[in-house]
Image (cartoon, helix red, strand yellow):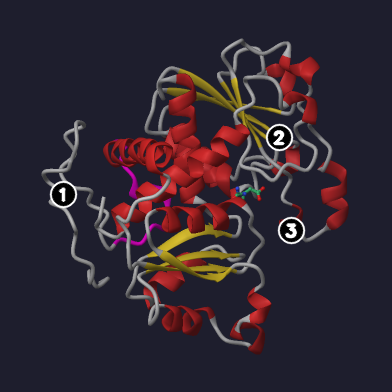
Amino acid sequence: MKSKTLTPLFDLEKMAGSNGHSGNGFTGMDILSVNQFSPDSLEYIFARAREMREMVARAGAADLLKGVVLACLFYEPSTRTSSSFIAAIERLGGSVIPITQGVQFSSVSKGETLADTVRTLEQYSDVIVLRHPEIGSAKLAADYASVPVINAGDGAGEHPTQALLDLFTIREELGSLNGLKVAMVGDLRYGRTVHSLTKLLLHYDVSLRFVSPEILRLPLTLMNEVIDAGIDVRETHDVADVIENADVLYVTRVQKERFNDLAQYEAVKEYYVITPELMEQAQEKMVVMHPLPRVGEIHYSVDKDPRAAYFRQVQNGMYVRMALLAAVLGRA
Ligand code: NCD
């Protein structure tokens, strides 16, 4: 059981907003997997993210999370996830213990376990954001910590906050989450953002197209979940098979760091490149997304295409994480 040491600043029932969601239900919760989210709770986070967007445009910052300390513990490289969590807490008046630019400078390099590191950080902080190379690491950390733990990527497992911002981006770009054809391209096997986003999309009336080389196909267990959900789904090796009909083209990097055999990586690393020529075949209202970093999958000349949404997606990450932090800390 997590202790709920922070008292909400506001009456959440009264502040539930126009979507009729009663209270946020997230107070004191660990955020480990997208399985924890229902369509209602997603709507709640998205509504709060829009408020955060307005607040930032209007005032830049607020003091909703004044006095809150976030420990940002990253055992894997990150630019967007770590910076957006830091920006999120700071724009809400809180502060950060940043262990992001090299866990090698912390006692982890002396052999300290994740459990002990987490049990130390919780003495100083109110919430821990963790990225770690092992599947299940966030769950393990949460078992030890009495403050909420937010999974910022556990190896090839999940990346729930990325999936929230991806879904939010689709919603804001296209105006709906239903009736869409979503094509996911690239490393579907190791790409944790693909795993989390796919699970969230199962709540909606979507068609899914998975495009990858043979060795990077979606894991079978996840494919079975998709099939069991009754979703219209197809797999292919060729982007040209899906681009004409796609509403969303979600492109990913081949996850070099997850390969045991680098020769296998070399064989597939340049499998896809989204070019302006390919974009000519796409619908006028399609959006191209990418969790970033890109390492060649989307040609730079696509960036000026208004359908290229990946930097807008980056910005949405901050609003969604502001909303999530406020919710988890009981101050939505
Ligand atoms: C992704 C990740 O870390 O899984 N990046 C991110 O968080 N924006 C995708 C990737 O590294 O390819």
Q: In the rendered view, tell whether residue 79 sits above or below residue 234.
A: below
The magenta stretch is 29-39
Disc 2 marks a residue whose amino acid type is Ser
Amino acid type, label 3: Glu
* Residue name at image x 60 percent, y 86 percent: 107
Q: Which residue in the protein does label 2 denote? A: 212
Residue 12, label in figure: 1
Q: Secondary structure at mark 1?
A: loop
Q: Main secondary structure of the magenta part?
A: loop
Q: Nearer the viewer, residue 221 or 322?
A: 322
Q: Residue furthest bottom?
A: 110
Is residue 285 among what the camera can see?
A: yes
Label whose residue precedes the other's in the sequence (2 or 1): 1
Classify residue 132 by image quadrant: bottom right
The image quadrant of residue 68 is bottom left
Q: Position of residue 287 (x, y in %)?
A: 59, 22
Q: Is mark 3 within 8 Å of ligand 1?
A: no
Q: Residues within 10 Å of mark 1 (few under 14, many from 20)?
A: some
User: From what the image shows, is residue 112 above or below residue 18?
Assistant: below
Q: CA distance from mark 3 to mark 2?
A: 18 Å
| Residue sticking out furthest to the front | 59
Q: Is residue 237 magenta?
A: no
Q: Nearer the viewer, mark 2 or mark 1?
A: 1
**Residue 34 is a magenta residue:** yes
Residue on which disc 3 sits: 257
Q: Residues within 10 Å of mark 2 (few under 14, many from 20)?
A: many
Dot 3 lies on which element?
helix
| Residue 229 placement: quadrant | top left
Q: Residue at x 24, y 58 (%)?
A: 330
Q: Mark 3 packing: few (<14 Cα in 10 Å), some, or many (20+)?
A: few
* Label total for image: 3
